Image: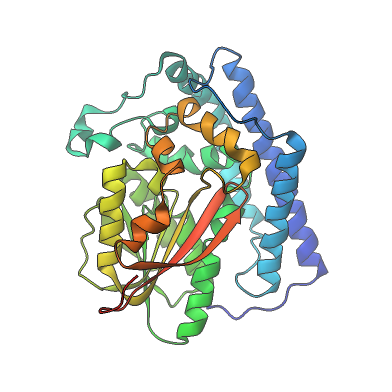
Amino acid sequence: MNSMVKPGRRARLAFAGLQSARVAFYGTHYLLARLLAGETVQPRTRRTHPLPSRAELLAAIGGLFAQDWRNVEEGLYLPQLDWRAELGLARKSVSYLRDVPKVVRRQRHNRHREVDPKQAKLPNYYQRNFHFQTDGYLSERSAGLYEFQVETLFAGTAGAMRRRAFVPIARYLKRRGSEPLTLLDVGAGTGAFLSFVQQQCPSLATIALDLSEPYLARAQRRAVRRGQQTQFLVGPAEAIALEDASVDIVCSVYLFHELPPAIRAQAAREIARVLKPGGLFVLADSIQYGDAPGFDGLLELFPGLFHEPYYASYARSDLKSLLAQEGLLPMHVDIAYLTKILSFEKVPCGQNA
């Protein structure tokens, strides 16, 4: 890992200013998107839980950023103060707002199969407009807007939530010392999390796996631009083209909730297969029912409003049991606002999970 220097007061103020600016900027875009949608888009799920108040949301966001900074002070990762990168992403504002009316039309008419017929070779569960977004995950245009869309959905907190998934990785790397290790990112998307990992650990060998060629191509361009070395594999999580016990760390960020239950189980099996005994698996995804009871109403609202067809089953699934069946021993759980991070150890052969 990079040698860490304890950040000073100036860095802390810059960090606080940047996070506040991000919440204001992306939160405003979220409100603009809802304004453009008007009152014609109604959730299709009847809620049995109340929605959290604005005060509850702001308090949780404040807690997220406070822990983010404590992690920096602990030396787990470097402070994220790249204003140039933030401005580059912010330039997607106009493209995002232009796309909102198209998203709204799909929401109104529940149209979620507007994808290129050329993508018919892909699994059926993947040929859809997740989030009602244009082209689903299946075009360069979609890949270009994805990070802006995610930050808008979470009002500027997505980056901070993703960073928490690195905490168990950082601690694992510290335990392993200077050993040469390999990390596989399953469902790497446009490479935001993997690029962050490489920033912290330039010597770590990394592999990016994703089913979307356009998204992976964007991740590859990011890696080239930043001088980061990564192996890129196009393929599904349920059929990873790697040898048994070939990687030391596997991570998966915001993937499992977008897989049907049967595919989710296959992906768990494949992750366990490619992971070495004693290896680490870090799963970062949406919170589930009961993780943060005050937010259960959001979990009910989300699937219908944003076309997440497999989310309802995910939100009630027993992830620990699913992975324990594959020899992955649950270690730690961390709740980062709307994200849950679980870490698992691959049980050595001959031991029971």
Residue 218 in the image: state x and y as whole percent. Answer: 39, 49
* Residue 305 against residue 155 in the figure, above or below: above
Residue 162: name its quadrant: bottom right
Taking the spot 35% from the left edge, 55% from the top edge, the residue there is 322
Q: Nearer the viewer, residue 242 or 138?
A: 242
Residue 86 in the image: state x and y as whole percent. Answer: 62, 50
Taking the spot 41% from the left edge, 46% from the top edge, the residue there is 317
One can see residue 237 in this view: no
* Residue 51 against residue 45 in the figure, above or below: below
* Residue 190 against residue 177 in the figure, above or below: above
Residue 146 in the image: state x and y as whole percent. Answer: 47, 40
Residue 207 in the image: state x and y as whole percent. Answer: 33, 65
* Residue 21 against residue 47 in the figure, above or below: below
Q: Nearer the viewer, residue 345 or 67?
A: 345
For the view shown, which residue lies furthest in the front direction? 352
For the view shown, which residue lies furthest in the bottom direction? 178
Residue 167 placement, left or right of 280: right
Residue 48 placement, left or right of 183: right
Taking the spot 44% from the left edge, 31% from the top edge, the residue there is 131
Residue 169 placement, left or right of 345: right
